Structures are given as C-alpha cells and as structure tokens.
Amino acid sequence: MKNHLLTALIALVCGFAGAGLWSLSGLGHNQTRNYLLSNPQILPDMAEAYQREQAKDRLAQAPDGVKQPFPGAVLGNPEGSHVLVKFTDYGCTYCRQSIAGTDELIAADPELKVVVREWPIFEGSEAAARMALAAAKQGKYAAFYHAMFEQGPPSEATIARAAQIAGLDQAAAKAFAQSDEATAELDRNMAFARSMQFSGTPSWIAGDEVIEGLVPPERLAEALKSVAR
C-alpha cells in the first residue's frame, strides 16, 4: 500500500512518465522506498532535478541557430556573452508581465544578450510581430518592443502608435513587414518552438535550461549563472 502511495506521489510531482521510470527502476523497493517514505520532503527536490534533466534533453535537441537573433532583434548587449532567448507574442498577457523582469535582468548584467524570437500564436498578433522585425531592420527594435506592449493588445491602431513612438519609417516598415524575409523568420521561429516542444509564450532558453511560462527573473538569472560559473 505504501509503495502504491509513493508511486502516486511521484506521479503527482514528477508526472506519470517519472512515476513509470520510478517503478521500473527498482528504486521503489526496500531501503530506498523506506527512506523516501520517511523523508517525503525531498520529493520536490526530486521533481525539480527530474524536470531540469528533461529540459537539458530538450535543449540538446535544439536546432542550430536558435540562439542567433534575427538581425537587430536583441535587447540588452548585442555582443553580450550571457544569452537569454525569449519566445514572445504581443497578444500574450504573461509576455507583457515579463517585461519588467527582463529589463531588471538587463540592468543588472551588462553582459546579458536577450535574443527575442517573434512567435505570434495569438489571433491578431502576426501583424505586430512583422512590424517588430521591420523595427529590427531599422535598428529600433527595443523601442518598438516596449512601445507595442505598452499600447495593449495588437490592432492596426496600436501597431501604428507603437511604430510612431519608436520613430520608424513607417512606409519602409510596412513594406518590409510583408516581405519574404519577414515571413521566413516567423516560419523559422515556429519551427524552433515546435522542435523545443514549447506549448505557449513566454518560453525561454536560459543557459542550459528550457523554461516555460511567466517565471520570476531570479529563476532566469539562476539558470544563466549556472553556465557562467
């Protein structure tokens, strides 16, 4: 009975795949089982270790170029040695909420290079993503990126206001937004996201970790430092 209970706890904390591995490994018996039953507080640590190993496996399968930005689509230090990749969507509330934390990381680390991958998965976001790539071409990506999130959900009006705030040559930007180059970049980002098995935005590659969702900046900083050490 206790063994079944422990397996259920492993399933709850690590997922059913982790529970299956637990059962097949032989660790669910005898001394190991008794130790874990007496010390259930280590289960969260086990879950975190398991999830990090899964993330490393996913990162090992990452396609070449995922850390190479579309020219200009970078925040922070374009030549920085610490690389954080962010998959984002201007229609994503959690992406908007992550802005302050990302800016905090940039301010704290002059070597931080944030590679932003435009991944428009929400309805109406593609036009904003295309205009962001046009802003990158004009060397005004960071200004458009922040302005676009500040304007609220993407629409023809909010995109135009963000472009004006960023100081874009709007005629040139609109032309580039419809170019094959912009389309190819969005297709590339979609392929990257699928290969990484991302389920939504924001999603991150920080150091040697793959992280999904809105997380505290401290979590991202920890992952970046683990590689720098």
Image (cartoon, helix red, strand yellow):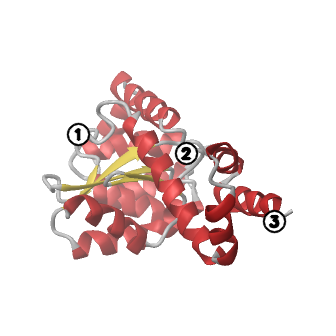
Which residue type does callout 2 highlight? Ser
Disc 2 and disc 3 in contact, CB within 8 angstroms = no
Pick whichever, 30 or 204, lies toward us.
30
Within-10-Å neighbours for mark 1: few <14, some 14–19, many 20+: some
Q: Which residue is mark 1?
A: 71
Instruction: Look at mark 2 in the image and give the residue it sits on.
Output: 125
- Mark number for residue 2? 3
Crowding around mark 2 (Cα neighbors within 10 Å: few <14, some 14 to 19, many 20+) is: many
Q: Amino acid at mark 3?
A: Lys
Q: Name the residue rendered at 20%, 61% in the picture.
A: 228
Sequence-first tag of 2 and 3? 3
Q: Real-space Cα distance between discs 1 and 2?
A: 20 Å
Q: CA distance from mark 2 to mark 3?
A: 50 Å
Q: Is residue 45 visible?
A: yes
Residue at 47% in and 67% down: 98
What's the distance in space between the residues labelled 3 and 1, CA to CA?
57 Å
What x and y, as percent, mark residue 96?
50, 64
At 57% from the left edge and 54% from the top edge, which residue is drawn? 91
